Amino acid sequence: MKQQEEDLSRLSSIFETYGNERKGLIPILLEIQKEFGYLPKEALKKVATFLNLKPIEVWGVATFYNQFRLTPLGKTHIKVCMGTACHLAGGRLVLEALERELHLKVGETSEDGQFSLERVACIGCCMLAPVIVIKDEIYPKMSPFKVEESMLPYRQESESFIEKRRKD
């Protein structure tokens, strides 16, 4: 509870920077996401109060624009390119294989916070299509068959992390 109060107190400096005019809504949301890594529900409520807006108005903006996240990213964040080249080369099949492998849908984060899955418009590696990015590493010429293999080191990392926490 105390941590949450400290986190929300960081909003004050963001509010001071932009003032309480409605035109500051998107910049404020961008700053909050930069600070927290996503848009916490409590922060959205505080923004509504500060800008004298209805909470549903703030929620509407936060859910309309796809650059805003309402859940934190996982430790291992995976981006699947769905630009034209990747889409035509089988990006949809790669995405579906990742969803099966991780038991996640696009935009979700695993319950343990280890994995998150995102669909992006273009990574800029069209000659290597289809492409995924795991953390900051690019995986070119992906196929559904390569998904399990590409996830192996991250699964092992996740399992060793879980084992370490069990011992602590």
Image (cartoon, rainbow, N blue to C red):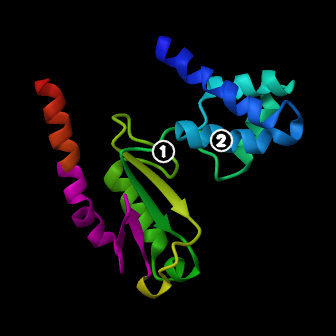
Image coordinates for residue 10, horizontal then vertical, percent: 60, 26
Q: Give x and y (percent) for residue 90.
A: 45, 77
Residue 21 lies in what quarter of the image? top right
User: Considering only vertical position in the picture, is 140 above or below 147?
Assistant: below
Q: Quadrant of the C terminus?
A: top left
Magenta stretch contains residue 76: no
Image position of 145 (left or right of 13): left
- Determine the residue positioned at 75% across, 36% down: 17
Residue drawn at x 53%, y 60% is 119
Q: Which residues are magenta?
A: 129-156
3D distance between C-alphas at marks 1 and 2: 22 Å
Determine whether the residue tagged by mark 2 lies in a helix, strand or loop: helix
* Closest to the observer, 157 or 141: 157
Q: Quadrant of residue 45?
A: top right
The one nearer the camera, 5 or 18, is 18
Q: Secondary structure at mark 1?
A: loop
Which residue ends up furthest to the bottom in the rendered image? 127
Residue lying furthest top: 1
Q: Amino acid at mark 1?
A: Glu
* Circle 2 crowding by C-alpha within 10 Å: few under 14, some 14–19, many from 20: some
Badge 1 is on which residue? 108
- Of mark 1 and mark 2, the one earlier in the sequence is 2
Residue ID for mark 2: 31
- On the question of residue 1 being in view, the answer is no
Indicate the quadrant where residue 55 lies.
top right
145 inside magenta stretch: yes
